[in-house]
Amino acid sequence: MIKLNDILNEDYPFDVYKKIEKLKGGALLRFGNEIWIKIGNRKDQWLCGKGIEKGVISDSTVVAQRIAKSNKKLKIESKLTEANKMSVSYKLNSHDKHDVEKMWFTLVKDKRKKPGDIKDYISKKLKINYFEVSSYIDKKLKIESKLTEAKMTQAHAKILSNLFIRMSVESVIPHKDILFVNYTKYSERRKLIKYAEKLFKYDSDGRMTNAPSGIPGVGGTNWIAFKSRN
C-alpha cells in the first residue's frame, strides 16, 4: 500500500520548493497528468516519468515552478516502491548497453514503431529507467551519423568493440576504410559478423595464415574486415 505523507495545493513555487527539495531518492510527485521521480539522494535531480516532459531531468526549482503553474493538487509518495524503484538513476554497465543495443536495432527495423515507444518498451522490459535508456540510444544515434565516414578511426573501433561482450575478440584495428577484428575462437565467426553488421558492412575474413600483411596489429589470429555501410 503506497503511503501518502503529504497532500499540498500551494500557491507559490517557493512554498512548494521547500516541501520537495529535501526529499530522498525514489520520492514520487504526482500533479495533473505529470509524474516526477527523485533520482539519487545527493543530487537535486527529478526525472519526469509521465507527461509532456517525459524523460527530462530538472532540479527542484524548475519542478516547483511547474507544480505551482499547473494549479493542480500535488501528491507526494516518499516511500520507494516497486513501481518507481527502477526510476532511481544509475550508470548502465556493459551488459546493459549490450542488451539495449540488441533490442533497439531489432525493434527499430519496424518502421511502424515510434522511437519513443521503442525506448519505453526497452525500459520496461529490461527494468532500466527510461532516461538512461533514452540518453544512451540518443548517443548511439548521433554516433550512427559518423558511421558513414569513409575513413575508420579509433572511435569507430571502440563502437564496434562495445558490441562484442563475452567473446574472444582481442582487438579491433582501424586501417584506412577498414575495421579489422582480431579474434581467437573461429566458432564465433558467424556471431561476430551478425553483431557487427548492425553497424558496419562485412567485407572479408580469414585465418592467421592469410591475414593482410603490413598492417600493425593485424595477424596472428583469425580476422574479419568490415567497411562503412554506405
Image: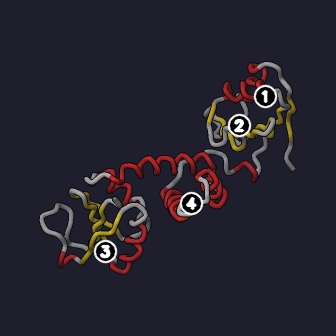
Give percent across and percent down for residue 95.
51, 60
Mark 3 or 1: in front is 1
Which residue is identified by label 1? 70
Judge from the rendering whether residue 172 lies leftward or rightward of residue 22; answer left or right: left
The answer to which of 63 and 203 lies nearer the viewer is 203
Marks 1 and 4: which is nearer the front?
4
The circle on residue 24 is 2
Inter-mark Cα distance, 3 to 1: 60 Å
Question: Do we see residue 214 in this rendering?
Answer: yes
Marks 2/1: CA distance? Answer: 23 Å
The amino acid type, in three-letter code, at marker 3 is Thr
Task: Tell me if label 3 and label 1 are in contact, CB under 8 Å.
Answer: no
Picture coordinates of residue 100, whole percent (x, y): 54, 58
The secondary structure type at the circle numbered 3 is loop
Q: In the figure, is residue 213 to the left or right of 192?
A: left
Quadrant, the C terminus: bottom left
Identity of the residue drawn at 85% across and 47% down: 2
Q: Secondary structure at mark 2?
A: loop
Callouts 1 and 4 close, C-beta under 8 Å? no
Q: Position of residue 110 (x, y in %)?
A: 57, 63
Q: Which residue is mark 3?
A: 184
Q: Which of disc 3 and disc 2 is earlier in sequence?
A: 2
Q: Nearer the viewer, mark 4 or mark 2?
A: 4
Position of 37 relative to 105 (above/below): above
The amino acid marked with disc number 4 is: Lys
Label 2 sits on what residue type?
A: Lys
| Mark number displayed over residue 111 | 4
Q: Nearer the viewer, mark 3 or mark 4?
A: 4
Within the image, what quadrant is residue 10 found in? top right
